[in-house]
Image: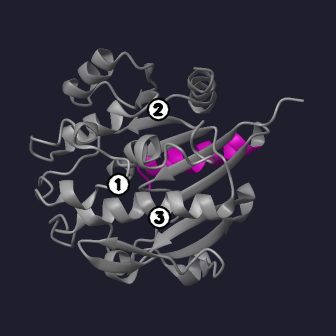
């Protein structure tokens, strides 16, 4: 009997924990559809401080917490929390840390100013997801990366964790939305993201160019096995990059009945 496909959803947003948006809605619907289709899934998102822990019944998973990750020569504790969406019978894991996710906002303050440490939060989140999946001893068939806060997942999985038995066969799909950041990440970001197994040539195009949203997503595409564009209005440079890299790509309209389209595309990428 063929083993059920395992899909890891890594997202910046998900309902009901954050307000409705194309990403939050899609990343709420797809994990449920995945389970209903007879596949396994795990879902991860940041535990932003604006998420009400009591109302959503989040609780810490002690056996998964306790690891420290060093960013800019500073130890940051990795705290893992979990909650259940009872109506869908599914669990959601949350990556938490006092330094990065305590503030009562997501990626911007009340005045719309982007947080200066979003670059470090991106690193911490992606590494935190990978290390937690390793502790779960779970081997994803497909990793679905949603939102720029997960943009380092492809690089880390394909390079830093290339020989890890849990990820060495995983295929990565980057899902791109009409969602970006306006202020480029600082130059130090390039040094912070480096891990064993990652070379300077692996971080093109941000190795010598500004770390803009477009360049960060180009980096994600370079290490992805497929890409979903959720709108035709996404930056043309990203469509061009996917074409240049010759990776499978598809446009799936967020207003369509899209669940099966996504699963079909994941199947396509998994067979590569």
Say which element carries label 1. Answer: helix
Left or right relative to 263: residue 231: left
Left or right relative to 41: residue 123: left
Q: Which badge, 2 or 3, comes first in the chain's sequence?
A: 3
Where, quadrant-wise, is the N terminus in this rendering? top right
At label 2, counting other C-alpha atoms closer than 10 Å, the crowd grade (few under 14, some 14-19, many 20 or more) is few
Q: Say which of 166 and 184 sits in front.
A: 166
Range shown magenta = 20-35
| Image vertical order of residue 115 relative to residue 155, above or below | below
* Residue designated by label 2: 255
**Which residue is depicted at the point 63% across and 21% down?**
271
Residue 128 tag number: 3
Front position among marks 1 and 3: 3
Q: CA distance from mark 2 to mark 3?
A: 32 Å
Q: CA distance from mark 1 to mark 3?
A: 12 Å
**Which residue is depicted at the point 59% across and 47% down?**
8
Where is residue 13? Give x, y as percent: 44, 56
At label 3, counting other C-alpha atoms closer than 10 Å, the crowd grade (few under 14, some 14-19, many 20 or more) is many
> In the image, is residue 104 part of the stretch drawn in magenta?
no
The prevailing secondary structure element of the residues shown in magenta is helix
Where is residue 50? Give x, y as percent: 39, 75
Q: Say which of 6 and 262 sits in front.
A: 6
Q: Is residue 80 visible?
A: yes
Front position among marks 2 and 3: 3
Where is residue 30? Give x, y as percent: 60, 42
* Residue designated by label 1: 149
Say which element carries label 3. Answer: helix
Q: Which badge, 1 or 3, comes first in the chain's sequence?
A: 3
């Amino acid at each position: 009997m063929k083993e059920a496909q395992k899909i890891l959803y890594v997202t910046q947003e998900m309902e009901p924990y954050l307000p409705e948006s194309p990403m939050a809605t899609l990343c709420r619907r797809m994990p449920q559809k995945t389970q209903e289709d007879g596949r396994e899934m795990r879902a991860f998102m940041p535990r932003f401080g604006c998420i009400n822990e009591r109302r959503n019944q989040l609780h810490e998973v002690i056996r998964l917490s306790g690891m420290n990750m060093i960013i800019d020569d500073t130890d940051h504790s990795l705290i893992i929390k979990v909650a259940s969406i009872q109506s869908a019978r599914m669990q959601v894991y949350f990556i938490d840390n006092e330094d990065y996710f305590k503030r009562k906002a997501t990626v911007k303050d009340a005045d719309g100013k982007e947080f200066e440490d979003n670059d470090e939060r991106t690193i911490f989140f992606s590494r935190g997801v990978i290390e937690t999946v390793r502790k779960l001893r779970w081997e994803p068939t497909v990793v679905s990366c949603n939102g720029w806060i997960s943009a380092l997942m492809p690089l880390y999985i394909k390079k830093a964790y290339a020989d890890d038995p849990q990820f060495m066969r995983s295929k990565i799909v980057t899902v791109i939305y009409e969602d970006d950041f306006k202020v480029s990440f600082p130059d130090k970001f390039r040094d912070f993201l480096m891990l064993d197994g990652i070379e300077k040539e692996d971080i093109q195009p941000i190795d010598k160019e500004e770390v803009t949203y477009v360049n960060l997503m180009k980096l994600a595409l370079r290490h992805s096995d497929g890409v979903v564009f959720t709108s035709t209005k996404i930056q043309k440079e990203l469509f061009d990059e996917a074409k240049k890299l010759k990776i499978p790509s598809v446009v799936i309209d967020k207003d369509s009945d899209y669940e099966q389209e996504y699963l079909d595309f994941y199947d396509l990428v998994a067979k590569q």
